[in-house]
Image: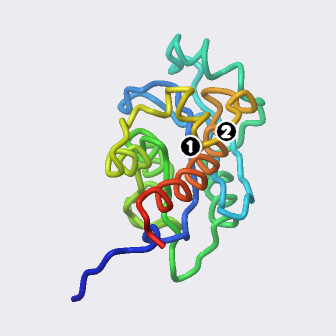
Amino acid sequence: MEFKNKKDFFSDNVIFFDTEFTNIDTEIGELMSIALVKPNGEELYLELAYEERSVHPWVTENVVPYLLGNKISKEEALNQIWEFIGRGEEKPFLMAYVNQFDSIYWYRLFSDPKEHPVFWIPIDFASILFAYGFDPEIMRVEDFYQWLDIDTKKYNKHNALDDARKLKEVYDKFKSRVLVSHNIE
């Protein structure tokens, strides 16, 4: 096998995603919403039915106000996700800012780590930041968005769709900045 410098990221077959959940404790938490954004900008946003008693007070204050209230069943969510992504041979990669919790809730939704419409290894954008010499928490710093020329005021925090949209915009602009800044042509 030959290894050489890459001129681009591994694949453009990426779906940006984010979830919101009732509790960071994955043993008791439930998925509240999920958003998927394709590179072409096509979006899917779903809110799922969940037990009100499982909602952590922080979530009640910071997430619930951004929900639309159009809750659907797990089965309907699965159908819509399969329809949105499709059943192609080449499965897209799921990318989240920090994927640990999002991925756990994704796998719980599908009840299987491999039988779902995306590649089984999720991509963690925070690790990409780390690999390029950035603090993985830099997405909490407004100067980073200014460097990328992104207006964060158009995004609500802790809204799955806005978070997935923002990740896509950050990824696109970050990719063009780092490939240029690393003299990769």
Q: Is mark 1 on a helix, strand or loop?
A: strand
Specify the amino acid type for callout 1: Asp
Q: Residue 160 carries which label?
A: none
Image coordinates for residue 84, horizontal then vertical, percent: 69, 64
User: Residue 115 is drawn in which quadrant?
Assistant: bottom left
Front in this rendered view, residue 62 or 178? 178
Residue at the spot 44% in from the left edge and 48% down from the top edge: 125
Residue under label 1, please give it: 18
Is 164 left or right of 117, judged from the image as shown? right
Label 2 or label 1, whichever comes before in sequence order: 1
- At label 2, counting other C-alpha atoms closer than 10 Å, the crowd grade (few under 14, some 14-19, many 20 or more) is some
Residue under label 2, please give it: 150
Q: In this view, does 185 lie above or below 61?
A: below
Residue at the spot 49% in from the left edge and 27% down from the top edge: 140
Residue at the spot 69% in from the left edge and 66% down from the top edge: 83
- At label 1, counting other C-alpha atoms closer than 10 Å, the crowd grade (few under 14, some 14-19, many 20 or more) is many
Q: What element carries label 2?
A: loop
Q: Residue furthest left?
A: 1
Image coordinates for residue 98, horizontal then vertical, percent: 42, 41
Image coordinates for residue 173, horizontal then vertical, percent: 60, 52
User: Residue 72 is drawn in which quadrant?
Assistant: top right
Q: In this view, does 30 lie above or below 5?
A: above
Residue at the spot 65% in from the left edge and 32% down from the top edge: 159
